Image (cartoon, rainbow, N blue to C red):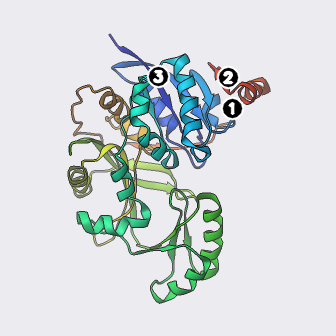
Amino acid sequence: MKKELCIAVTGLNNTDNPGPGIPVIRSLRESKEFNVRIIGLAYENLEPGIYMNNMVDKTYQIPYPSGGSDALLERIQYINSKENIDVLIPNFDAELYTFMKAEQRLLEMGIHTFLPTIHQFEERHKAVLPKFGEKYGINVPKSTNLTSVADIRKLKKEYQFPVLVKGKFYDAHIAYNEEQITSYYNKISSKWGLPIIIQEFVKGTEVNVVALGDGEGNTIGAVPMRKQFITDKGKAWGGITIKDDQMLDLTHKLIENTKWRGGMELEMIRTNEGKYYMIEINPRIPAWVYLAVGAGQNIPEALVKLAMNEKVEAMSTYSTGTMFVRYSYDMIGDISQFEKLSMTGELENIHIKA
């Protein structure tokens, strides 16, 4: 008999820059061990996941972490008083710090999480990734942190174009001259703040791994994929699972050495010479996680079991050649749904006619 669980999930923005929320929910809906009631936690009232049929059972609007952790946690406490949440799965980098710091407070409410430690989160930041690579023996492209536009003029002495221009949480663009760097600097910093990271551009194939660590050095699941189609925002719009023992070995060693706790995504470049460069480590489940489920590893289900202190067997096999392709889809709803969420901050059991 399946266990009944109430699981709260953020990241319902299933757009061209998708959050991981909907893939996580799809994965949990297919769990062989749990029957789930899904509580969607939305920051904006037009996040598409709110209105997708048979995904979220009830949506609550929550304040941005930038508005203060107390306001966010008070809202979570209110939601929990109505829903009795068992597990909370945050899916945005920018919100993780608040939830990591509040882990004990959430547990006192009866809400379980399974997140990286603050040390793990801080150690792998893009701004300090070269130090991380040096510490753990991983190739990382050269990078420089910019804190003012004046710093851009100094880059031509250290870098050859093109270079990557990255925000501390999100956004990455290829720049071919100083003018483009300045444009991206202004655009990204206005949204995500400083520093802006300039990273050496490494030619090769983009390959990613979604993985789950148990916090004790063991890899519970890991599935590598090669990006087949990439959007102008650098997001995978299509990908395929691959056999890559070297990349998996790197993942296992990294989780063992860091004792990583929770989901993670390793973004790497594999050069034509077969050398691997780590370009990012995302400290949560990525938006393409449903590919791993399709290949045989239900990583969100395993994460929930870890959060609930249940025994989890490591998943060591997956199907290669499993492919995903994203698509756009127009949903039809009613203005009353939008109005209700906007006025009350709550919306229950959306069913949209085809």
Most extreme residue toward the bottom is 157
Residue situated in front as seen by the camera: 32 or 319: 32
Graded by Cα atoms within 10 Å as few (under 14), some (14 to 19) or many (20 or more), the crowding at tag 1 reads: few
Q: Is residue 24 visible?
A: yes
The three-letter amino acid code for the residue at tag 3 is Ile
Q: Do residues under tags 2 and 1 come within 8 Å of each other at their CB atoms?
A: yes
Calculate the distance from the C-alpha at mark 2 to the C-alpha at mark 1.
8 Å
Q: Position of residue 303 (x, y in %)?
A: 34, 33
Count how many numbered circles sit on residues in the image: 3
Q: Position of residue 100 (x, y in %)?
A: 41, 42
The part of the image, by quadrant, that contains residue 279 is bottom left
Q: Secondary structure at mark 3?
A: loop
Residue 317 lies left or right of residue 113; in this view the side is: left
Which numbered disc, 2 or 3, marks the residue that appears first in the sequence?
Answer: 3
Q: Which mark is residue 331?
A: 1
Graded by Cα atoms within 10 Å as few (under 14), some (14 to 19) or many (20 or more), the crowding at tag 2 reads: few
Taking 29 as reference, is 161 above or below it? below
The three-letter amino acid code for the residue at tag 2 is Ile
